[in-house]
Amino acid sequence: MRMQMKWFVMGLALLLAAPLLRAADIRLPEFERHVLDNGAVLLLAEKRDVPMVALDITLRGGSLVDPPGRDGTAALLAELLQKGAGKRNAAQFAEAVDAVGGRLGIDAERTSISLSAEFLAEDATLMVELAADALRRPHLDESEFTKLRERAIKSLIAAKDGSPDRLIGQYGAAFLFDDHPYGRPSGGSEATLAAVSHADVTAYHRDQFGGDRLIISVIGDFDRKTMRDLLQAAFGDWAKAAGALPTIEAPARVQGRRVLLVDKPGATQTYFWLGNVGTTVDDPQRVAQNLVNTLFGGRFTSMLNSELRVRTGLTYGARSSINRLPQPGPLAIASYTRTDATVEALDLTLATLERLHDEPFDAAQIESGRTYLLGQFPPTLETAPQLADHLGRLELYGLGREEVDGFADAVRAVDAAAAREAVRLYPRADDLVMVLIGDAAKIREQVAKYGPVTEMPLTAPTFRPTKH
C-alpha cells in the first residue's frame, strides 16, 4: 500500500510540474544555505506541492583520489556502502529502504561520490539515518567487496564482447590525456580493478570521507529548521577527512593527429571517437558553446547526424559532446559505421568538422538552436531529485543560482558573433586524437593516412596501450 501511495504521489508531482515544462524562464526555488561547524554545507528548499522529499549528498573527491594503479576504488566503495551499514546487514538495509517505498543509491564520479534518495516526507528521519549509516558507518564487508569487484571486471569483459561502444570514451580519454588524472577510468579497468584490495577501499573511506567534504541538498515537504536539526544530528559531529584532495593541473591541447586502433578481430563495424581537450565547467562562453554543440552534434538534425545518418546512411547516429570539469575535460565526436565504410565515414566526419569552422551559422540556425535549448532545459529540473542534484553540483563547482535563473536570457543573448567565438573551442580536423575499435586486419592500412597509428587488442586489460 505504501509503495502504491509513493507512485501515486510521484505521478501527481509530475502532473503539477507539467506547466513548468512549457516555461522557458526557469528559476531555482528559494533555498537556505547553512554551513555546519565541521564544514558540511546544507542547501534546504521547501517544496510542499506533494508530501515527498529528495535528498542529495555529495562528497568531494571521487575517482580523482583513487590510489595510483587502482582506478575504480571509489566506484567499488560506492557500491559497497550500500551492502550493510549501522545496525543493518546488506539485506536489512535494502529492506528498510524498500519497506517505506523509498529509493537510495550511491555512485562515484570523477570529482565526487554522491548519494541520492527519495522518500515520503513522513519517513525523513529513517532515510536520513540510513544515509548517515551508509556514509559514516558502512560495514565494508570483505566478501561483498570481492563479489562486487568480480562483477565489475566481468561487466567490462562483457561490454568488450558485445557493446564496445560503451567503452570507447574510456579509450578516448586514456589516449587523449595519457598520464593526466583525467585519463584514468573512473570505473577502473580490468587490470586496475583486479589490483584494488579490500584494504584499499577501507583506506579510502577512512581517509577521504569526512564532514568537511559534504554538500547536502534537500528539496521537498519539510520544515527547514526541523530538517536542519536532523542533518546536524546526523552529520554535524563527523570529523574532517584525514586525506587531502589532489591539485589537478590543466591538460595541454593536442597538436597534430594520432590514432589508436583497438583490434577486435571479426568486427563488422568500426566504432570511432575523435577528440581533444575542451573546456572547464565555468567557461564564460559555455551557453554559446552548448548552442553550437546542439547545432553541430547534439540533436537529431545536427550537422553530424544529418551527414552521417540522414544523407549518407553510414550510421544510425553521430554525436558530439563537451564534458566540462574543473580543468578542461574532453570534447569529442563519436559514431560507428560498417567496417568497409570506415574511411568514408571518418573523412565525412572530418569534413563536417571543417565546415563547422568555415561556414558560420546563419540567423535561422542560431534561432533554431536557441529554441531547442530553451525547450530541453526545463525538463532537466522538473522533479525534486533533479533540483537537489542541481543544487549540489552548483555548490560543488562554485557556480551561482544564475546558472539556472539566468539561463534563458543567456541563451537568447547568443548571437552570430558569440556563436563564431564558441566554434573556436572545437579543434580543427588536423588536431585530433582518433580512437577506432574495429577489425585491424581490414582497416589498418587505410587508417594510417590519418596519422601515426598505435595498436592494442580489445582483450587487453587496460584502456591504454603499453608504453615501450
Image: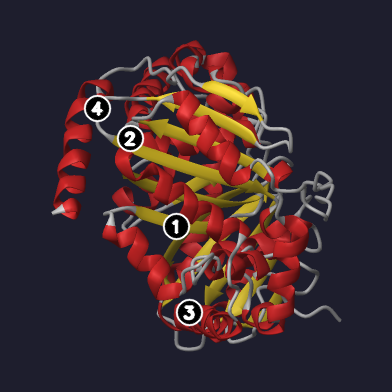
Tell me where residue 253 appears, x and y as whole percent.
77, 46
Residue found at x 78% / y 60%: 207
Other residues around mark 4 within 10 Å, as few (<14) / some (14–19) / many (≥20): some
Residue found at x 58% / y 85%: 146
User: Quick check: marks 2 and 4 in contact, CB under 8 Å?
Assistant: yes
Q: Looking at numbered disc 1 in the image, what kind of residue is underneath it?
A: Gly
Q: In front here: 322 or 308?
A: 322
- Per the model, the C-alpha gap separating discs 4 and 1 is 24 Å
Q: Looking at numbered disc 3 in the image, what kind of residue is underneath it?
A: Ser
Q: In the image, which disc is placed on residue 17?
A: 4
Could you tell whether 390 is left or right of 432 in the image?
left
Q: Secondary structure at mark 1?
A: strand
- Per the model, the C-alpha gap separating discs 3 and 4 is 37 Å
Other residues around mark 1 within 10 Å, as few (<14) / some (14–19) / many (≥20): some
Other residues around mark 3 within 10 Å, as few (<14) / some (14–19) / many (≥20): few
Q: In the image, which disc is placed on residue 383?
A: 2
Query: Is residue 57 in sight in this rendering?
Result: yes
Q: Nearer the viewer, mark 3 or mark 2?
A: 2
Q: Secondary structure at mark 2?
A: loop
Pick whichever of labels 3 and 4 is earlier in the sequence. Answer: 4
Mark 1 sits on what residue? 105
Q: Secondary structure at mark 3?
A: helix
Q: In the image, which disc is placed on residue 155?
A: 3
